[in-house]
């Protein structure tokens, strides 16, 4: 609730250990006048305002709560601007917005973490061998911002953001020992918030929480299966056969289909579009262009579904208490899902040379994305 002039005047008087009589005497007004001001019954003459401000060594804006209100409005503006840029995948605009925010709010730990996470995303989306790569430049800033939060911030949610980001940052830089040291300071699965809340809640709240946790676990398991197939960090990309790698990704997709049998995938249309595109690449390695193309068609279907989503509810019996909120998800690249699929088709063009269906797919995507900017990574 915004404080009134009377509340602020009373608080300033008490903070300076003054009685109403003493302040009235200093301002050369009656005790009754001062009492009416503090109770919001009347206001002092405008010519007295500067004198009151000087008495308490504050600005006239402070007396009317203008500086606090304006600062809060400014904070909300920066946060809304940052959120909009993240939704659109414009990481450079996110970076610039948070740098401007910290110029005005240099000790705002929330903005520090927004900036640190954005710099990490730019790092991850930039080729390490690029001459313009920001990896070395941003590494120092990321660590400095996170350490300031851990040293000075009392809010546990921001401290946890700092720990998680530092873990990922150290791991990406090959500093495994530093990452492990931080990771061991975070609660394990049996003691995490999701497990504890499941023990505390009851009724509809318990069901909602259980479904939310199951959906997160579904995504984690499916994402890990795809990661084992494609990410070198698992050490399996050279040892698994192509059939095994296909099995891993296909199993991930089957898990989504199993637990969302009505195909109302909401956000996970996006994940499925990416997974089918990766299956296409695997089938191309097997020199099976027909199966590869069928995966591209599945990717197109899910990309169209995702681009046309509005806020809505999951209807699967396993997740029917949950809703998808588009504003809650951020991207690290600019453009639509159909635009991203079109962007990736350029990488596959030589593999489908002379394939009539591929040319038609590209034409459909070009038509669908004609009015939007080209995809920009990072």
Image: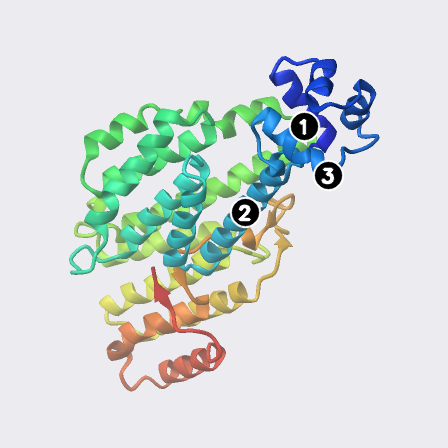
What residue do we see at 33% from left, 74% from top?
Answer: 345
Q: Position of residue 325 (x, y in %)?
A: 58, 51
Please tell me whether residue 328 is drawn above or below residue 181 in the rendered image: below
In this picture, residue 320 sits left or right of residue 340? right
Of pointers 3 and 2, the one earlier in the residue sequence: 3
Please tell me whether mark 1 or mark 2 is closer to you in this view: 1
Secondary structure of residue under mark 1: helix
Secondary structure of residue under mark 3: helix
Please tell me whether mark 3 or mark 2 is closer to you in this view: 3
How far is mark 1 from mark 2, CA to CA? Answer: 21 Å
Are circles 3 and 2 on residues that touch, CB within 8 Å? no
Classed neighbour count for the residue bearing mark 3: other residues with Cα under 10 Å, few (<14), some (14–19), many (≥20): few
Which is more toward the observer, 343 or 32? 32
In this picture, residue 38 sits left or right of residue 134? right
Classed neighbour count for the residue bearing mark 2: other residues with Cα under 10 Å, few (<14), some (14–19), many (≥20): some
How far is mark 1 from mark 3, CA to CA? Answer: 16 Å
What residue do we see at 41% from left, 60% from top?
Answer: 90
How far is mark 3 from mark 2, CA to CA? Answer: 27 Å
- Identify the image quadrant of residue 113: top left
- Identify the image quadrant of residue 52: top right
Residue that badge 1 annotates: 8
Are circles 1 and 3 on residues that touch, CB within 8 Å? no
- Identify the image quadrant of residue 361: bottom left
Q: Position of residue 374 (x, y in %)?
A: 39, 73
Mark linked to residue 46: 3
Residue that badge 2 annotates: 74
Secondary structure of residue under mark 2: helix
Q: Position of residue 165 (x, y in %)?
A: 34, 38
Q: Can residue 142 be seen in this snapshot?
A: yes
In this picture, residue 289 sits left or right of residue 136? right
Which is more toward the observer, 335 or 362? 335
């Amino acid at each position: 609730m915004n404080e009134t002039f009377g509340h602020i005047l009373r608080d300033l008087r008490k903070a300076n250990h003054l009685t109403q009589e003493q302040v009235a005497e200093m301002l050369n007004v009656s005790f009754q006048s001062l009492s009416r001001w503090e109770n919001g019954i009347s206001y002092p003459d405008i010519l007295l305002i500067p004198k009151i401000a000087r008495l308490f060594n504050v600005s006239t804006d402070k007396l009317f709560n203008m500086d606090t209100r304006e600062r809060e409005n400014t904070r909300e503006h920066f946060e809304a601007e940052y959120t909009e840029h993240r939704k659109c995948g414009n990481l450079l605009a996110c970076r610039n917005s948070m740098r401007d925010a910290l110029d005005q709010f240099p000790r705002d730990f929330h903005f520090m973490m927004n900036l640190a996470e954005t710099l990490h995303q730019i790092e991850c989306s930039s080729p390490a061998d690029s001459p313009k790569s920001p990896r070395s430049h941003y590494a120092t800033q990321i660590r400095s911002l996170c350490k300031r939060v851990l040293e000075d911030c009392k809010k546990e949610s921001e401290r946890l953001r700092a720990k998680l980001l530092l873990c990922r940052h150290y791991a990406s830089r090959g500093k495994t020992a530093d990452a492990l040291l931080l990771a061991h300071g975070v609660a394990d699965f049996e003691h995490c918030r999701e497990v504890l809340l499941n023990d505390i809640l009851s009724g509809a709240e318990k069901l909602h929480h259980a479904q939310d946790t199951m959906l997160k676990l579904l995504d984690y398991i499916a994402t890990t299966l795809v990661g084992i197939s494609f990410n070198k960090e698992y050490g399996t990309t050279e040892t698994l056969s192509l059939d095994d790698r296909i099995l891993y990704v296909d199993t991930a997709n089957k898990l989504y289909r199993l637990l969302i049998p009505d195909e109302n995938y909401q956000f996970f249309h996006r994940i499925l579009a990416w997974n089918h595109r990766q299956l296409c690449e695997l089938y191309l390695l097997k020199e099976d262009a027909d199966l590869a193309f069928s995966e591209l068609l599945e990717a197109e279907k899910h990309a169209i579904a995702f681009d046309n989503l509005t806020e809505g509810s999951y209807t699967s019996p396993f997740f029917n208490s949950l809703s998808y909120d588009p504003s809650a998800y951020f991207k690290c690249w600019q453009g639509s899902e159909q635009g991203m699929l079109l962007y990736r088709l350029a990488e596959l063009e030589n593999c489908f040379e002379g394939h009539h269906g591929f040319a038609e797919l590209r034409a459909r995507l070009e038509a669908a994305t004609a009015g939007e900017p080209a995809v920009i990574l990072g």
